[in-house]
Image (cartoon, rainbow, N blue to C red):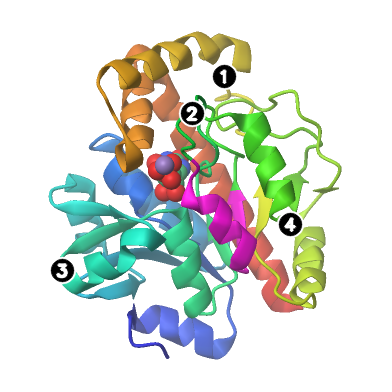
Amino acid sequence: MDSYLEIRPQVMEALAEGEPLVALESTVISHGLPQPRNLETAIELEQIILAAGAMPATVGIIGGRAVVGMTEAELAVFAKGENIEKASRRNFASVLDSGGMGATTVAATMMVARSASIDVFATGGMGGVHRGEALDISADLTEFGQTRVAVICSGPKAVLDVARTYEMLETLGVPVIGYGTTDLPAFYSRSCGIGLDQHVIDAAQAASIMAAHKRLPAAGGIVFANPPPEAAAIPAGEIEGIIEQALIAAENAGIRGKDVTPYLLDHLAEASNGRTVETNIALLRSNAEVAANIAVAYARR
Ligand code: PSU
Ligand code: MN
């Protein structure tokens, strides 16, 4: 096994037995959700995956290795967020080399999941093409183009240019497959007005497409787009106003690079009196459960 990985025993065992596994990222813990909801959620997502019959493996960089299967104590340290670098592919080696801690983004977690032979990964919303002129495009997209992991998420984050993100995914050859929907969800919203021409109705069908996809040369990632639960979703029209305010605030504060997404999520949480946080958690839970079901169906094949 690649030496940059530290695969924990319970994950190693599940891999050896051919049991279903679901990877989880740690940027959402350290930089995406406020305390103490972030730690509660990180623990709960693992419980949901276990209850659905799969092994959870939260990924983070600790002491020069990419840990696959963080402990609860480690999750608690990441939830505190002190000295936890947001690590994507571009700065992964620096964080490893520093010997410090790094919270892995979608891109970095996909890379680690592939190295560890984990085929399924659950998160909230993916990164993508940011609005405006800055040519700020998340490395999540290029990772999807090259790394074969099925990622269950609720579409691109609503703060992005969702239409351009979808076009970019098409260019990169990434299947974007609605899970029980024919509309592209946009994180907080069940629909953003973009229709999907590929969809599945259940986990077995998702696993079947994954198996076909694996047969292709240089197969990259797959997006399974699972809309947020009806009760927690916020209609796009209702959230757009505060997103625009958040973008203006970020611009005025001179926020750039990897700080943009955490800043925007934080701003939305405050401006909505915590409503976006509850939606984010509800969709994370749902995505974890769907991911576990897909992992179980895939492992059965
Ligand atoms: N999903 C969430 N909350 C988050 C993220 C995803 O519900 O905070 C994180 C992911 O780790 C994703 C990152 O990779 O936001 C995107 O950051 P950027 O736009 O800087 O690539
Ligand atoms: Mn960026």
Task: Confirm whether the magenta stretch covers residue 21.
Answer: no
Q: CA distance from mark 1 to mark 3?
A: 40 Å
**Magenta span:** 137-152
- Whether residue 67 is situated above or below residue 165 in the rendered picture: below
Q: Are marks 3 and 2 in contact (CB under 8 Å)?
A: no
Q: List x then y, in percent, for residue 9.
A: 35, 84
Q: List x then y, in percent, for residue 167.
A: 71, 40
What is the quadrant of the C terminus in the image? bottom right
**Residue in the foreground of this view, choosing between 108 and 136:** 136
Residue 63 shows in this picture: no
Residue 234 - label: 1
Q: CA distance from mark 4 to mark 2?
A: 29 Å
The residue wearing badge 4 is 173
Labels 3 and 4: the sequence-earlier one = 3
Q: CA distance from mark 1 to mark 4?
A: 30 Å
Q: Are marks 1 and 2 in contact (CB under 8 Å)?
A: yes
Labels 4 and 2: the sequence-earlier one = 4
- Whether residue 66 is situated above or below residue 182 in the rendered picture: below
Residue 279 - label: 2
The residue wearing badge 3 is 98
Q: List x then y, in percent, for residue 114.
A: 53, 74
